[in-house]
Image (cartoon, helix red, strand yellow):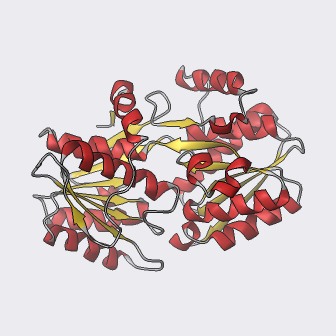
Amino acid sequence: MRHTVKAASIMSVAALALTACGGSDSGGDATSGEGGSDVKACLAYDVGGRGDQSFNDSAAKGLDQAKDELGVEIEEVEASQGENDAAREDRLNQLVDAGCTNIVGVGFIYAKAIGAAAKDNPDVSFAIVDDASADSTGDNVAQLVFAENEGSFLVGAAAALKSKSGKVGFIGGMDVPLINKFDAGFKAGAKAVDPKIEIQTKYLAEDGSGFADPAKGKTAAEGMYDKGADVIYHAAGGSGAGVFEAAKANKKMAIGVDSDQAKTAEKDVQDVIITSMVKNVNVAVFDYIKASVDGKQMSGPQEFDLKDGGVTYTTTGGKIDDITDKLDDYKQQIIDGKITVPAK
């Protein structure tokens, strides 16, 4: 049965999570918090790891908050480009051997590995971010998923409202169902504003390398800007840094993802980011760990959506202040069920 996280839970920890930073290095080092909890929470990052200024960093904030506020011991490891499911499963089992009581796989690439490791280690609690497939199911697995299409609808509308050329672009790290949700929502939002808008789409790779290749992201964005796009939204993890560089060089606009990238990206490109579609991965990770500390283990799908504050858009820099009333109207229509956002 799907459990939807309530707004009060999201909002009560979100403000605290925004200030969390630092923590252990992503090389397997373990550190302890102040509370002396018996929980040892461990993160297995997607490609790019801590420091990607996006998806992984958002998860890291939740881990850091758990260490600081709940007193849990933490440990971190990171995926490598081109590795297979067996390698990922080995990494999870290494965390089990290291005494981790709670293990989070950050990203859908861990689906099969989480499923296998959870089956082999029924006394360990697992969670996976961005996957609710049969591959990762288990009584001891919490599937932390988001309504990325809903948040992407709002930034798609923002792109269309701010575009002067009537041409915008979407760059995804990999052509898979998860990233297709970002793409579908973005297109729906842009077309809700301007049915005739031209939308260019590019996926960077057939594997996880598409989320950790800024050079490839920059090349893809330059091609779109050359063809007239003036706003590009990326869902490409660390590759998004290249999108921002291209926007800066071409004096165009860009939209960030997962974190408020007008705050987390390199300072010299922050001014080109008009908004970001934020996924509160930090809140999901923190809530999962806190449930264990409280003796209330999560299991099964846990959905974080627009209504509950699991996804949203940012206003840092004031570049969309003139259109927030329109975006908030779309937001309310989605929450009220008047607009159904496609997921593919």
Q: Is residue 344 visible?
A: no
Foreground: 138 or 160? Answer: 160
Above or below: residue 132 compared with residue 173: above
Q: Height in image: 132 above or below 216? A: above
Q: How many numbered marks appear?
A: 0
In percent of the image, x 31 and y 46: which residue is there?
65
Q: Is residue 338 left or right of residue 246?
A: left
Q: How far from the left and from the top, in percent, is residue 319? A: 73, 36
Q: Which quadrant holds the N terminus?
A: top left
> Residue placed at 35% from the left, 27% from the top?
6
Picture quarter containing residue 186? top right
Above or below — where is 116 with respect to 307? below
Judge from the rendering whether residue 12 lies leftward or rightward of residue 163; answer left or right: left
- Where is residue 252 shown, x and y percent of the image? 81, 52
Coordinates of residue 123 in the picture (x, y in percent) = 10, 58
In the image, taking residue 222 as reference, residue 38 lies left or right, namely left
**Residue 166 point in image, percent of width and height:** 87, 43
**Residue under the point 70% across and 44% down:** 187
- Depth check: give the residue in front, 263 or 327: 263
Q: Is residue 153 left or right of residue 30?
A: right
> Measuring 40% from the left and 72% from the top, which residue is drawn there?
79
**Of residues 207 and 50, the one drawn nearer to the viewer in this rendering:** 50
Position of residue 174 relative to residue 293, above or below, is below
Quarter holding residue 269: bottom right
Most foreground residue, 112 or 107: 107
- The answer to whether residue 228 of the structure is visible from this angle is yes
In the figure, residue 99 lies in which quadrant?
Answer: bottom left
